[in-house]
Amino acid sequence: MYGRISFHAGDDMSKKISILVQLIMGFSLIIFTIVAFTIFLSYRSSSQAVLNRSNQYILESVKQLQGKMDAILQDNDKLSSTIMFSPLIQETLGDLAESRTPPTDAMDITRYIDQQTRSINYDIQFKLLGLSDNQVYTNSSSLKVIWDSEREIRGAYWFPAIAQNNGRMLWFGVDVWQNGTIPVVMGARQINDWNDLNRLGTLFLVLPVEVIHNAVSQFHLGKNEKIQIVDSFNTIVYSTDPDEIGLYMDDRILSQFSNHKARIIPNTINSRNMFVSYAYSPYSEWSIFAYIDSKEAVKDLNGIRRNIILIGLLGMAAALLFTFFFSWTLSKPLRNLATKLSNVERGTTLPFVKTTMNKEMAILYSSYNSMLQNLDHTIADLSSKQISEKQAQIVALKAQFRPHFLYNTLNTIYWSLANKHMREESQMVIALSDLLRYSIDRGSEFVTVDEDLQQLERFIYLQKLRYEDKLQVDLHVNPEVMNRQLMKLTLQPLVENAITHGLEPTLREVWLIRIRAYSEGNSLVLTVEDNGEGMSEARMEEALISGEVNPEKLLHTGIGLSNLNHRIELIYGHGFGLHLSTSELGGLLVKVTVPLQFEQG
């Protein structure tokens, strides 16, 4: 019956490529293309991300350094204001301006200035010049300003700028004498009568360059970094290269930042590719330049490139193993079927008795067994059908098992890990950056209650990261006072004081701070109370007495309760200020009262 059946294979059958080899080659080519394309895109995106992150870090560091510089200068500015507007100085210079003999002598003023500056841990010189040449007052200092009279300073290049500032501090770099000429930072301002604003003289404040150096040394942007600080006269006040101090800044670099916008640009300096980061202070009118080697800025890219290549190679190896296994599982049933068909030519017609997990191949096996039952009548049709079905199955299986899902899954995992890795740290840096920027901003000294509350919420956010659930804050603000004006940084120092001096010394499991803002008649009332250790009535009275500042009475921010109370009284008038009492929570209650309606100026 089966003697008429024969299969004639050509002589070149052995030269044909097997399905297994074709599947391995085809899938390998697809996988190689996908992996190579993935590595290329991943490296490009990672490189750009690393570069953007490095630039952002450098720029934020320079902004923080600018804020640090402003904070140092403003602290000394405030000290000079305290001295300049003290009754002793005002009355003495006022008498001299009216050609009257003051009741105090130069030693009294020297002792007063020494008393005000004794808490400063670095050498500083104050010098007051009256309107006449013989009116010179200074503190005890090893720094010596070379100008000793109004007549001597009128020819200085910086003198016109002092007059234009109308009493505001002008900061710049000069040389003074200290066992030789040394560079220093000088602040100069016009002394005005606090009653009629008539000019009474000139005040000098000299700081050693080491003050700036100590602040700059806390910022590390990488190896071979260089930082320059330039004053409003384009003089280099400070540089990590000491030989540059006192020189004029390169006009080519200054011209690239003429709009004073904080940014970072690439530049070539002495045949080296550098990133130049820039920040400008509206307060001091100083510019800060940071120079970073471009190779140092993107040094993480080499590690990223190695990791991406390693991951790509491991992924490709795993994909090839999967491809080989997958291709083998597809080709093995076909090989078995081909062997059976070859046996038919030799007269062996044993049916398939083994099962297969592949549905399509199971159909082929069943069809083969059916073919054997009636081979004479169906051989031609069955052979054609078998070839068509085999081709259809291969196409279907290729479409079904294309490994695009591997790329999508790896990509999803990568971005998920990348996003989660820096999320909390990024939120902390942003909160701290906003906190510092608000604190040192030289804009208006008056803000809305809403704006001061936003600053307070940033501060509370950082504190809760430290103390977690131990710190509980109950905040309630009447909506009608949200847009009312008040003095900037009124709430944050009080909350910080409650934490530092009220809550931290206690052993309570839960720290509670209650904050309220509401209107009371024609007054805006702010209250901050805690469940800390509180104060005795004697300490409450002592805390609001003006006079010499005791460090134990200072808030953590450096603003005394008495000074804050005095500042409110100076701005808003008598009847407004701070009131201390015992809180029902067990700690201290600080009540701040200011006018509900207040016109600036």
Image: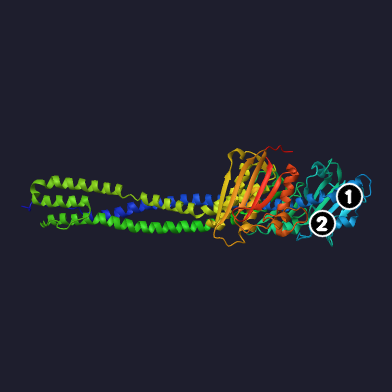
Q: Which residue is mark 2?
A: 125
Of pointers 1 and 2, the one earlier in the residue sequence: 1
Q: Residue shown at 73%/56% (left/top)?
A: 542
Residue sitting at 75 percent across and 42 percent down?
573
> Which numbered disc, 1 or 2, marks the residue closer to the eye?
1
Counting the numbered discs, the total is: 2
- Which residue lies most toward the left here? 1
Quick one: label 2, few (<14), some, or many (20+) residues within 10 Å? Answer: many
From this viewpoint, is residue 574 visible? yes
Q: Tell me, yes or no, whether the two marked residues, 1 and 2, touch with CB atoms within 8 Å.
A: no
| Crowd around label 1: few <14 · some 14–19 · many ≥20 (10 Å) | many
Q: Secondary structure at mark 1?
A: helix
| Left or right, 204 with reference to 229 | right
211 or 80: which is nearer to us?
80
**Residue 291 placement (x, y as % from top left):** 66, 53
Closer to us: 466 or 399: 466
Q: CA distance from mark 1 to mark 2?
A: 20 Å
**Residue 350 left/right relative to 403:** left
In the rendered image, is residue 33 in sight? Answer: no
Which amino acid does the dot numbered 2 rest on?
Gln
Q: Position of residue 359 (x, y in %)?
A: 21, 51
Give the residue type at disc 1: Thr
Q: Nearer the viewer, residue 116 or 479?
A: 479
Query: Where the C terminus falls, by quadrant?
Result: top right
Q: Which residue is mark 1?
A: 92
x and y percentages locating residue 278 in the rendered image: 66, 48
**Who's the residue at 36% across and 49% down the image?**
404
Q: Where is residue 121 drawn, in percent x and y?
A: 75, 61
Judge by depth and name the residue closer to the eye, 222 or 458: 458
